[in-house]
Image: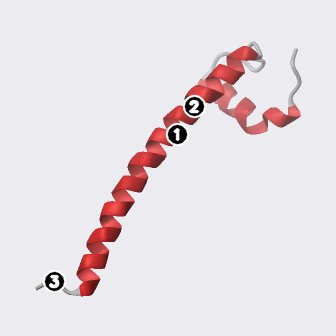
């Protein structure tokens, strides 16, 4: 017979795996949305992933060229 702590630990591990999967999906969607917005502003810092991430992070301080 399982002890309550073991059941809780198993449930926690399952939820943790689901959270990891969801956060990975969210990261992909966020990157895609960032690139769409970055291209809309004509890639002001160049066409690299790092430039896009910097722009997305600080975009409220940039202006359209």
Other residues around mark 2 within 10 Å, as few (<14) / some (14–19) / many (≥20): some
- Which labelled disc corresponds to residue 27? 1
20 to the left or right of 4: right
Q: How far is mark 2 from mark 3, CA to CA?
A: 43 Å
The residue nearer to you, when weighing 49 against 34, is 34
Q: How far is mark 2 from mark 1, CA to CA?
A: 6 Å
Helix, strand or loop at mark 2: helix
Quarter placement of the N terminus: bottom left
12 to the left or right of 23: left
Q: Which is closer to the viewer, label 2 or label 3? A: 3
- Which labelled disc corresponds to residue 44? none
Please give the name of the residue rendered at 38% of the width and 61% of the height, measured from the top-left corner.
Answer: 16
Tell me: residue 42, above or below residue 22: above
Other residues around mark 1 within 10 Å, as few (<14) / some (14–19) / many (≥20): few
The residue nearer to you, when weighing 56 against 19, is 19
Q: Which residue is mark 3?
A: 2
**Does the residue at mark 2 contact the one at mark 1 (Cβ under 8 Å)?**
yes
Tell me: residue 54, above or below residue 65: below
Question: Of callouts 2 and 3, which one flags the residue occurring earlier in the amino acid sequence?
Answer: 3
Helix, strand or loop at mark 1: helix
Q: Which is closer to the viewer, label 3 or label 1? A: 3
């Amino acid at each position: 017979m399982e002890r309550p702590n073991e059941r809780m630990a198993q449930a926690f591990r399952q939820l943790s795996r689901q959270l990891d999967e969801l956060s990975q999906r969210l990261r992909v969607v966020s990157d895609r949305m960032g690139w769409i917005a970055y291209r809309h502003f004509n890639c002001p810092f160049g066409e690299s992933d790092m430039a896009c991430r910097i722009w997305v992070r600080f975009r409220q301080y940039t202006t359209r060229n």
